Structure formats: C-alpha cells, structure tokens
Amino acid sequence: MKKIFTYILLFLSLQVGAQESKENESPTSRILFIFDASQSMYGTWGENKKINIARKYLIQLIDSLEKTPNIQMALRVYGHQSPVPPQDCSDTKLEIPFSDRNASKIRQKLRYIIPKGTTPIANSLKLAANDFPPCENCRNIIILITDGIEACDGDPCQASLDLQKKGIVLKPFVIGIGIDPNFENTFECVGDFYNTPTEEKFEKALSVVISRALNSTTAQVNLLDSYGKPTETDVNLSFFDHLSGKIKYNFIHTINYMGNPDTLVIDPLVTYDLVVNTLPPVKKDSIKLTEGKHNMIGLNAPQGYLNISCPGTNQYRDLEIIVREDDHLQILNVQKNEQTEKYITGEYDLEILTIPLIKLENVKIEQSKTTRIYIPKPGVANISFPAPGYGSLYKETTDTLEWVYNLNVDLLYQNLTLQPGSYKIVFRPKNSKQVTNTITKNFTIKPGLSNSITLY
C-alpha cells in the first residue's frame, strides 16, 4: 500500500513542478482529516476492527504526504472524548491544527484514539470552518472518514454547503466504512461519497480521494468568432467559484505557438462561473471540469473594432466618446479619440462629447472589421463679453433653438471649440436687472477656422 501512495505522490509532485514553471507560486493544499472515533468504530469489519483498519491506511497516507511540497495537514476527531450513554453532541475536537512538519503528531494521535461516543458530523463540519487559518493562496480540502450517519439531529448537507458557499473549503470527500447502502443518499449531498464495503475497497478509495484532492487538470477556452472558429483572444478570463462567488483565477487568453488556445491548469474540484471580459462581457455559468482529461470550454465571443477620429487637427486629442449597447442606458465604455477598441459584434449607440454633442445610433460592429467614424473638423469661436453675465449658445433651426452650451458667468472672454455650423448667442450682463439688455448674436463656424464674436 505504501508503494501505491508513493507512486501517487511522485506523480503529483511532478505535476506541482510543472505548475510552478507556469506560475510564480503554487497554492498550498491544506487537508483536514475528520476522523470518526464513535463507539461503532470498535465494530468488527472483515478480519479486524474498523478503527484499526481506518487508522492503518490513514497513517500510511500521512507517511506519503509528509514530504510532498505545498501540502499541510490537520486532524479533527469526533466521538473520542465522551462515552455513550449519555450522548454528547459537542464531542468533536481539532486535535492537530495545520502547521508544517506535523505528520508525526497526527500519526501519534491516531495511534492512541479510543472510540467512545456519538457521531456529530454536522457539528464537526461547522467547527471545521475555524480550523483553516486565513490564507490567500490555499486550497482547503476536507476528507471525512466515518462508519455512520449523523446522530445528533444536525444537517451535514447544510453544514457542508455553508462551508462551500463561504469559500472556506472545496467540495468535501466522504469515505464510508461499511455504511448501509440505504444511507448512501445521506452523504451524496455532503460531498463526493465513496462507500467501502471491504478493507480493500477502503484502501482504494483513500488512494483515489487523495489523488483527486491534489490533482489539477487542464482546460482550454475557445472564444468563437462569427464563423464558429476559436480565433478570438487577448482578453482576460475570470474564473469564479460558482457557490461562493469568489475569484479563483485570472488569465489573459492567448493563442499558443501551435495556433490553439493555450492550455490552462486549474483545480477540477470547483464548479466555475466564467466571465470573458470583452466589451460587453460574455459569461458562462456552472462549468464542471472532467478530472484527468483536457476540457474544452466554448463561448461565442465574435468581435470587431471601432475607431473614432478627427483627422487633420489636434484640438480633439482629449475628446471622449460614450459607448452604449444599442437601446441600453448603461454606459459600456468611454472611448478616447483616435483610440481603437474591440467590441462584441452588434449595434451600439455613441455620444461623441463635442460641442454640440454628436449622437450616432445603431453603429454596426462586424467580425474582425474596423468600423471607422470620422468627426467633422471643428473651428474656434473667440467670444468677448462687455461684462460677466448669463448666457447660452444655441443652434438655430427653422422652428426652434437647440441648446448647445452654457457660457461661464464670470469670464469676459471665452474660446470654444465648436463643430461647423450656424449658432446664436443669447446673453445678459450680471449687473443688469432689465431683460431689455439681453444681447443676441448669430455667427458661423467653419472647419479649421476661427471666428471672433464681440457682444456689444
């Protein structure tokens, strides 16, 4: 058995090394063993007692894990402090907390545990939330070994779900020791459940669980263009834990030297929500990976380009353009003049923050094409006032005045960069209290030219 564990851990160590070549720092896998030491563990199982078989193989596993990099272990035991009757549902204790080089302490504790009490599984899971100290780069794993179901009216399923929703642990593993098959459904909601009717099955299940707990798997994200080909790339992929909502990974998508989306090495024990941070974002929820296989994740993300510019002038170098999805009020992006941005194909509404404002609706973005918008070259209005005062700038149409801009009430002179066209100023000095002192003046702006307007 030790040889089997040694081969597993050798394989996993090689994977850890491969992962470290891709990332600056591999996460620490923290394994909390929750061990059943209730009175029923004294029962005979095959040719030995359950407690002897369980601790024998668990000690062998700990021997194999002891020198594996990026692994920490801890041991919580229940049912070993208070005999039954009476039933003590608080009989659960973190015997050996997480630390480096604590394998000998765990082995020593396991050797001398005496089964006595009841089975408070739910309470053990709840208390396990505090067994994992804060850590920014850790994978927290629970392996529960038990021969019986909850005996204290707790809800192990809810306790496990709460741990996962809070992002404290990954989905637990549960190894049942000769549990009645009629009770298997009781554990399937707690975690990945392995019922072992024999010692040999228990040995194999422990090997499979530790391999799954420490194994990573591979995936590639295919960002599909309008033709269904995975050509889109160079965008951030954000992977979130579906249950907790916590961010797990960020990758800038790339096409590798073979012309394929590059391979990601990620934890297969998490159900993911994926956000592709295109404009607008593309999302895919509840992604489950198949362990030990190369997983393909496909999303439709066809994109094209938008460029807005005003050739022949530098007066708009700081100009901004508001971009919205067609018929959406929420601002999607604020794009700069002369800048080229990538958007999901479709139609967009633009507000170009010139004076006056230019509104363009249903601007179409097509696959791999650049939609170019040219802003008319502006002119300059140099406006002189007889005194500080109140005034506005308008564009005159056949039947109305369209407001353009409110003038600064404190200045005697203003320079305005305006789009070509015909304008009207309506102005009254601040110190005048008679509406008859209102001044109006019409003027025209031509591309690239200045016009001096004096309000006297």
Image (spheres, rainbow, N blue to C red):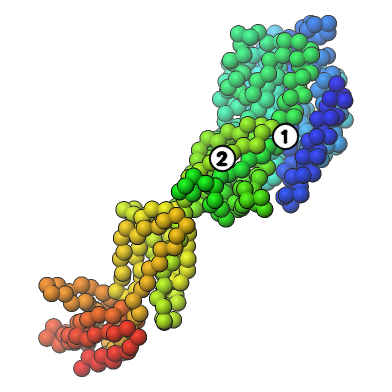
Work out which quarter of the rendered image holds the C terminus and state it: bottom left
Q: Who's the residue at 26% across and 74% down the image? A: 404
**Residue at left offset 68%, top offset 18%:** 194
Q: Which residue is mark 1?
A: 215
* Residue type, label 1: Asn
Q: Nearer the viewer, residue 139 or 209?
A: 209
The image shows residue 129, relative to residue 34, as above or below, that is below
**Front residue of this view, candidates 39 and 279:** 279
**Is 94 on the left or on the right of 378, as rendered?**
right
Give residue 357's position: percent from left, percent from top.
31, 70
**Rendered residue at 41%/81% (across/down):** 312
Q: Is residue 284 above or below residue 47?
A: below
**Mark 1 or mark 2, whichever is nearer to me:** 2
Q: Quadrant of the N terminus?
A: top right
- Residue at label 2? 297
Up-down relation of residue 268 to residue 422 (above or below): above
- Checking the image for residue 114, the label placed there is none
